């Protein structure tokens, strides 16, 4: 993907540098203090529930379907075309424009770490990797990995492997239980009482595979989603599972606000804390999984982490990552210029927002997330049948061109 981007950008006549498989940068103009545009070319796994091939772009009804169309290749491409339009129009630039495309945004951001060791990062800019009008507040992030030995009593669970990524709300969760016909009846009755859609299948004599069906999505945006692991935990607790399963069902279950972990909080600037269990596996008699917290700007991350751990008795908990929140003042030139571009191109009101989604914006001293999802559009990032509307992508390209002119040419 990175090689392809390098070739395409070179083909468009830009000066392009590749950084050893981690990232590339594409520059327009030679002025100092470059305006950064930070996008990413990596994607999360396809997951379940697609009606088209996730890795074969499909155009239908003015939309282009495929994993990454909206997060983040489409918006990155719209920004690149904005740069090309500025160049083709011959607009003189005082500052250069530097697009940096990384390949590790969905995991550990090794790309930006590598890039910043080789090259000084620009001071200001935006990442087209979220929503319009503009996000100037990104919540803090805590990623925890937990593990515990499986209970020796209660319901017999043979296998479970759900989730690839801690930042995804899993749409399906499957566990293999040990029992007879009577078990299947109990599972069905419990699921019905809980109003959980499930599927069951006998995979071998005495082995019942049970799948809970939730609503997948991005872990930072749990509203309207339903975590299939949370459903599975509650179902298993109902069926008599003990030990770590009961602890997790009680402390997390289907909550996405961290309430029973003692972590629920909010502030005016950023809204409420969110929490997601993206992974839960049972292997060699040990449960392991992850929790992904997105925390308000004013929250104390260490305190929240310690509180969560205190609510997970019997678990070994490891801190994978803690990223502080990021905030750029609404009256900064950057925010004012971008919002003016948005207002001029759309006729809509531009107001800065907060998000739980972390974007590359926070690697810049003054970085914000800017588009490309419009306020009336459904967020399909990390979901099945992800698409980008072509008209909207064109409008985004115009907004980006307008914004880059304001920042680099004026
Ligand atoms: Zn993204």
Image (cartoon, rainbow, N blue to C red):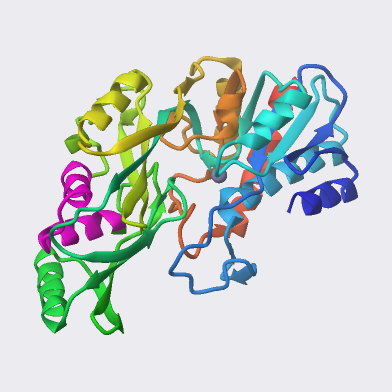
Work out which quarter of the rendered image holds the N terminus and state it.
bottom right
Compared across the picture, whether 329 is left or right of 122 comes to: left
Compared across the picture, whether 286 is left or right of 81 comes to: left
Is residue 223 placed above or below 407 in the rendered structure? below
- Residue 50, percent from left and from top: 48, 70
Q: Which residues are magenta?
A: 229-253
- Residue 37, percent from left and from top: 68, 33
Q: Residue at x 81, y 42 (%)?
A: 84
Compared across the picture, whether 152 is left or right of 212 comes to: left
Q: Residue at x 79, y 54 (%)?
A: 4
Q: Is residue 172 visible?
A: no
- Residue 139, percent from left and from top: 41, 28
Q: Residue at x 65, y 40 (%)?
A: 39
- Residue 34, percent from left and from top: 76, 22
Is residue 24 placed above or below 321 in the rendered structure? below
Q: Residue at x 49, y 16 (%)?
A: 329
Q: Does the stretch in magenta take in 246?
A: yes
Q: Does the stretch in magenta take in 137?
A: no
32, 154: nearer the viewer: 154
218, 331: nearer the viewer: 218
274, 174: nearer the viewer: 174
């Amino acid at each position: 993907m990175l090689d392809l981007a390098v070739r395409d950008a070179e083909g468009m006549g830009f000066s392009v540098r590749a950084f050893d498989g981690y990232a590339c940068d594409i520059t327009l103009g030679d002025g100092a203090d470059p305006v950064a545009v930070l996008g990413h070319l990596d994607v999360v796994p396809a997951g379940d529930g697609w009606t088209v091939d996730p890795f074969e772009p499909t155009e239908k009804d003015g939309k282009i379907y495929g994993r990454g169309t909206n997060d983040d290749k489409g918006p990155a491409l719209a920004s690149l075309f904005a740069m090309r339009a500025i160049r083709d129009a011959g607009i003189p630039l005082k500052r250069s424009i530097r697009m940096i495309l990384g390949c590790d945004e969905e995991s550990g951001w090794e790309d930006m770490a590598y890039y910043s060791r080789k090259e000084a990062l620009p001071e200001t800019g935006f990442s087209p990797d979220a929503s319009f009008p503009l996000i100037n507040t990104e919540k803090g992030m805590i990623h925890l990995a937990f593990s515990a030995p499986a209970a020796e009593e209660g319901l017999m669970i043979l296998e479970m492997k759900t989730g690839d990524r801690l930042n995804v709300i899993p749409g399906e969760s499957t566990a293999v239980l040990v029992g007879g016909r009577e078990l299947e009846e109990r599972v069905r009755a419990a699921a019905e009482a809980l109003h959980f859609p499930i599927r069951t299948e006998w995979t071998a004599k005495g082995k019942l595979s049970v799948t809970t069906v939730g609503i997948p999505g991005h872990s930072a945006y749990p509203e309207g989603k339903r975590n299939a692991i949370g459903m599975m935990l509650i179902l298993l607790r109902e069926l008599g599972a003990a030990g770590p399963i009961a602890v997790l069902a009680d402390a997390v279950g289907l909550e996405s606000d961290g309430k029973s972990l003692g972590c629920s909080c909010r502030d005016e600037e950023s809204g409420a804390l969110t929490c997601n269990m993206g992974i839960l596996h049972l292997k060699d008699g040990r449960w392991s999984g992850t929790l992904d917290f997105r925390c308000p700007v004013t929250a104390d991350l260490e305190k929240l982490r310690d509180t969560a751990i205190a609510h997970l008795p019997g678990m070994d908990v490891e801190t994978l990552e803690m990223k502080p929140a990021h905030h750029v003042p609404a009256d900064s030139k950057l925010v004012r210029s971008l919002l003016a571009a948005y207002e001029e191109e759309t006729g809509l009101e531009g107001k800065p927002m907060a998000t739980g989604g972390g974007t590359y914006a926070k690697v810049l001293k003054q970085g914000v997330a800017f588009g490309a999802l419009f306020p009336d559009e459904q967020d399909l990032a990390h979901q099945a049948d992800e698409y980008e509307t072509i008209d909207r992508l064109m409008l985004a390209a115009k907004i980006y061109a307008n914004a880059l002119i304001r920042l680099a040419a004026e």
